[in-house]
Image (cartoon, helix red, strand yellow):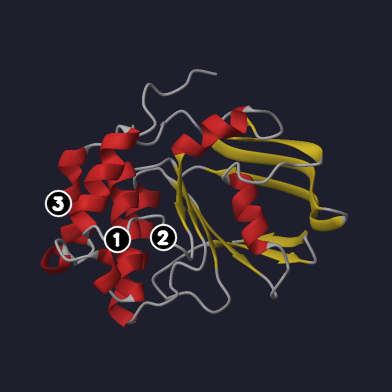
Amino acid sequence: MSRRSSANDFVRADLVTVASLCDVVVTTGSFPLLSGVNLTLESSTTYVISGPNGAGKTSLLRLLAGLEVPSRGSGSVLGFDICSTQRRELRRYVGWLGHETSFYPDLSPVENLLFAARTTGAEAAAVPSALERVGLTHRARVPLKSLSAGQQRRVSLAWLLVRRPQLWLMDEPFASLDDEGRALVSELIGSAQTAGATVVLTSHGALPAETHATSIVIVGGRIVEVAP
């Protein structure tokens, strides 16, 4: 399969199946995080992973990001074999929104994003408009550590807009956000899906009404339901 020339090109129109997992098992020590996972993810679709605490929601996200190594089974994400060293290359094509930020606390949002763009080959010219879209223009040049948790989450969202990944993986994206922030996340998810990207997110509670997603229910490391 042909690869994109840059990790920051946007979605490939010819990629219909974004991920395919077959009987995947992920363990830590002798403890199974995921057991016999079978899953297919399509392009231009949003999925929400739900389930009780410790069910394996974040582990499934990390697997799709190439951050977990299957101990059994097979799978591919964006055409990369996640059971081989190809998963390292996969990480360049995936947008990740986790609970922790990897940005530098003493740098401002604009400095962090420009630095990240230079080191990854992303389009630095997209940084100002991304910060404007997430409502942070007025806080773009203050130290990141002076921002609230919700504002720092917005910086991470701005980075996704700069990166323009084919696959968005979002761990509790509505956490630490007010109503305005939740509406913003819903808008960005909808825009990404319309543009052809696939969005996979985890959630403990109900999604905003404007967020339409296929449900993936996971219990005890096993997917028990996939439904629109």
In front of the other: label 1 or label 2? 2
- x and y percent of residue 91 in the render? 51, 38
Residue marked by disc 2: 101
Marks 1 and 2 close (CB-CB < 8 Å)? yes
Task: Tell me the residue at 30%/43% (across/down).
Answer: 116
Circle 3: is it few (<14), some (14-19), or many (20+) Cα within 10 Å? some
Nearest to N terminus: mark 1 or mark 3 = 3
Residue marked by disc 3: 128
Task: Tell me the residue at 19%/44% (across/down).
Answer: 126
Up-down relation of residue 8 to residue 148 (above or below): above
SS at circle 3:
helix
Q: How far apart are marks 1 and 3 (CA)?
A: 11 Å
SS at circle 2:
loop
Quarter of the image holding residue 137? bottom left
* Quarter of the figure that contains the C terminus: bottom right
Q: How far apart are marks 2 and 3 (CA)?
A: 19 Å
Up-down relation of residue 46 to residue 209 (above or below): above
Nearest to N terminus: mark 1 or mark 2 = 2
Query: Is 214 or 123 nearer to us in this picture?
Result: 123
Q: Which amino acid does the dot numbered 2 rest on?
A: Thr
- x and y percent of residue 184 in the render? 30, 68
